[in-house]
Image (cartoon, rainbow, N blue to C red):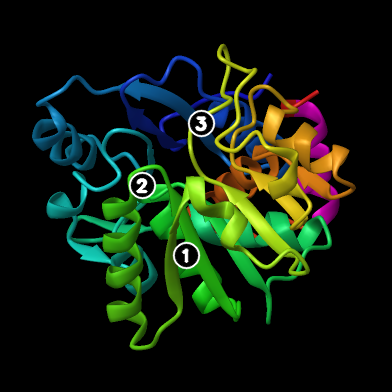
Amino acid sequence: MRSISGTTYICGLIGNPVAHTKSPAIHNFLAEKTGFDLAYGAFPVDTGRLDKAIPGAFALGIKGLNVTVPYKQDVIPYLSEIDPLAEKIGAVNTLVRTENGYKGFNTDMPGLLRALERDGVSVKGEDVIILGAGGVARAAAMMLETAGAEGVTIMNRNTDRAESLASSINEICGRSFAHSLPVSAYHRLPLDARYIVIQATSVGMHPDTEKAVIEDPEFYKRVKIGYDLIFNPPETKFMKLCRQAGADSYNGSKMLLYQGIIAYEYWTGLSVDDDLADACYAEVFK
């Protein structure tokens, strides 16, 4: 067992709830294998206490924090600085201690990109569908634009929300990159087209595992690769429908892994290679 001393870097996760998190397993495994003197825990922050939590963590000398729901947007006013990508996405999930406060980063979307790359999926020049129009969908769309995707179609049950998100993304990008389409209108998609589809809603998450945003097999004839950001269960109904239609599908566990790895690299200055990443994945998601 690693020893913890007065010089140990203390890092952790803030959010509400945090009891289910796999982040301590990821970071403490990496610290053990790299020999870096770091310990990571989970800190629940009650509603209305974020304004105390961030300066309190800084006062206590905490070196870095991950941020999960519901605070990825709410934390921004309490930062001394924000990375341009996180500002563009509009959400922060990693805080790095600086002399004057915490600098905010978003490692979720770089984590998704690294996960896709490790699974052999390139988004460059591809047409992508995003199911959902929330904060995760926004972040995914911004990542896709940065990574060179041809365009994204945002599909959501609430059409106004999808239209608003597409308009906001296009304004930031300065071009017509995002389009919206009601979920019920998937039949308008060309039948001969093949899309990478990112499932960015909570539909199908444990314990309600027998649902998908779109359940008609006709939609899945248009899917080339399906990527569900849910990791529990390991195979969602969306993934099953993709595979039944002959498309490869993946869950969100590698995104979770790589967002953690990138945060760890920010905090320690180390680089985590593919072998260590694979070992961490096997340990945490075994």
Q: Is 112 or 27 nearer to us in this picture?
A: 112
- Counting from the top left corner in percent of width and height, residue 86 is at 35, 63
Closer to us: mark 2 or mark 3?
2
Check disc 1 and give the amino acid type: Ala
Q: CA distance from mark 3 to mark 1?
A: 33 Å
Residue 93 seen by the camera: no
Q: CA distance from mark 2 to mark 3?
A: 32 Å
In the orientation shown, which residue stands out farthest toward the right? Answer: 246
- Counting from the top left corner in percent of width and height, residue 167 is at 29, 71
Q: Secondary structure at mark 3?
A: strand
Magenta-colored segment: predominant secondary structure: helix
For label 3, the residue is: 39
Horizontal side of 115 relative to 132 (left or right) equals right
For label 1, the residue is: 141
Instruction: Give above or below for 201 relative to 219.
Output: above
CB within 8 Å, label 2 to label 3? no
Check disc 2 and give the amino acid type: Gly
Q: CA distance from mark 2 to mark 1?
A: 11 Å
Q: Is 1 or 79 nearer to us in this picture?
A: 79
Check if residue 280 falls in the magenta segment.
yes
Closer to us: mark 3 or mark 1?
1
For label 2, the residue is: 134
Instruction: Give above or below for 94 relative to 164.
Output: above
Give the residues in magenta. Answer: 274-283
Residue 104 seen by the camera: yes
Check disc 3 and give the amino acid type: Ala
